[in-house]
Amino acid sequence: MTESAALLPSGLRDTLPPEAEHEAEVTASLLATFRQNGYRQVSPPLVEFEASLLTGAGAAMTDKTFRLVDPASQRTLAVRADMTPQISRIAATRLSRWPRPLRLSYNGTVLRVTGDQLRPDRQFRQAGLELIGSDSDAADAEAIVISAEALTALGVQGLTVDLSLPLLAPAILPALSQDGALSGELREALNRKDQASIERLTGDAAPLLTQVMATAGPAAEALDRLSALPLPDAARQVLAPAQTLLPLLMASLPDLVVTLDPVEHRGFEYHSGISFSLFARGLHGELGRGGRYWATAPGFSGETATGATLYLDMVMRALEPAAKTNRLYLPTGTSPAERRKLQSEGWWTVASLEASSNAATEAKRLGCSHVWQAGAAVSVA
Amino acid sequence: MTVVSKNGREPLVLALPKGRILSEAMPLVRGAGIEPEADFDNPKSRALRFATNHDNVSIVRVRSFDVATFVAFGAAHIGICGRDVLMEFDFPEIYAPLDLGIGACRLAVAEPSELVARDDPKTWSHIRVATKYPNITKRHFAARGVQAECIKLNGAMELAPTLGLCRRIVDLVSTGATLEANGLEVVEDIADITSLLIVNRTALKTRPAEINGWIERFREATRAAAA
């Protein structure tokens, strides 16, 4: 049996009206918020040399990246699975002489070898911002505040920011860490909050780690409870930026729900400081994530950075469906000046290509909401 | 988008596994202060979802593997399932904060007793195994450099060697009586299994006080049951 021409490879889809139009509007709105806050837009290519995409924060995407051999240069190319490494590369190279802190925004589709459980899509759009070259806590706060404001401006309800401290568990467990990273098995157990396995793997450190894990919840309370625990100095140093950050967040967005999960590590393996995920109440999965990392490119020493990436497929799910658009059918003979005037008033016009005996019927057949008759927009619904 | 119950609180769904674990789990569920409607204990009931003494809490009763799926996708917020299920499927959206200490058994490799005597596992490069747990089985044998070809069965694993489907099985073993009755014996343990309280990641992030409250109540109930 031959396959239907409509079939697409798994995880890929066509987006149709009105969703495609809605997504374009939402993307524009996000970028507008970023732009208003001083972020300049860049647009890197879809494909680049493998090495530059998989350096630094990009290394986390090694298993999810499509690769191909460039027939021209015979070099291995990779399709971006994430845009942050591209922004790091631009900052380290072409924009190395632009003043710091450097604020860049972007949007584009990414492609992954596999989707994940909640989001089987292999291709989706990202929109994000990166704040490069400042280690201040205000920079961490800015990335969170602007992401939250951009989502709130779109009408996302019940936004929650979950802060994580990926360096805390390694600081509590120096004996179980190598180069600041925990063993894979322990990291898995922490990611799953699997108390029984954590006790088995951490031995003497288990009681303290359990107390640390139990603080997860509303951020202010969690920080108070964490600072009351007998943590080693290294762990206190990890905690300090979060204590400065929280009042900054509250000052900007007093209504924002902020939670803290001190041992969450999932997907933050390459983060070097405060990290965060964005959730909306009632929506399964993350709207985006971000945090502090080391922005670098092959052959460059790199610099500290923070940022946020929003996933458009998830953002769309958090929004009400697009409002029905008013489309106006223009019978033959409508002057171009009149058409432009109606468009400037906000109408989406659909011009008749040939004279028809009943313009209202034709308007309805083409899915228009109104028809232009005798100088007035008449509803055909 | 969000459904709100009469008292203004969002609904909370607890997923419980049918069968063996349920009878051990119910004292803990009740100990945590959740009392299902009477129909729950009626074996003739065809209902799948049950109200409880809490206005916004309902219980669904599904297969053990499906408990994890419901919780992973956020269709249920809290659930009880065996560690075997979490080991078989990598569910990044599930947290397992509490070992309930119930449903204790082990996941083991078994084969016919007469095979045990003449078999040298060191020489294997490829074996065929009947199991409900193809992922765990492949991973377990791959770590020893053995390629495991798995035949997925959903029950009555013990029949496979007797009827010549394959010679080895990987299955849950509690007393070993079923194995013995079918002329099989355990040659290797893969893991100790108990049941865990699991919660959906997003639910914990967006309703931390409420979900943490339930985890604490189950922790208390587990402690009380152990004492």
Image: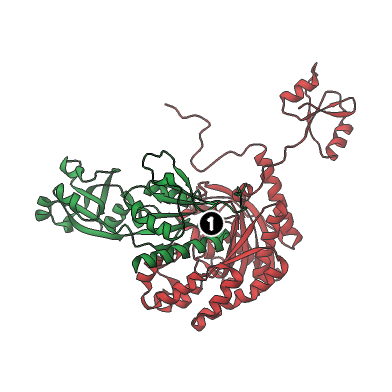
Most extreme residue toward the top is A357
- Amino acid at dot 1: Ala
Q: Quadrant of residue A307?
A: bottom right
Which chain does red denote in the image? A
| Residue A185 in sight in this render | no
Question: What color is chain B drawn in?
Answer: green
Q: Secondary structure at mark 1?
A: helix
User: What's the residue at 38%, 57% (across, down)?
Assistant: B27
Instruction: Decide which of A145, A330 is in the foreground and name it.
Output: A145
* Residue B156 position (above or below residue A360): below
* Residue A355 position (above or below residue B211): above
Q: Chain of mark 1?
A: B
User: What's the residue at 70%, 68% (across, down)?
Assistant: A98
Left or right: B56 in relation to B140: right
Assign the C terminus of chain A to one quadrant of the image.
top right
Instruction: Decide which of B64, B91 is in the foreground and name it.
Output: B64
Left or right: B199 in relation to A103: left
Left or right: B83 in relation to A221: left
Position in image of residue A351 (x %, y %): 79, 28
Residue labelled with disc 1: B203
Badge 1 crowding class, 10 Å Cα cut-off, few under 14, some 14 to 19, many 20 or more, is: many
Position in image of residue A68 (x %, y %): 48, 49
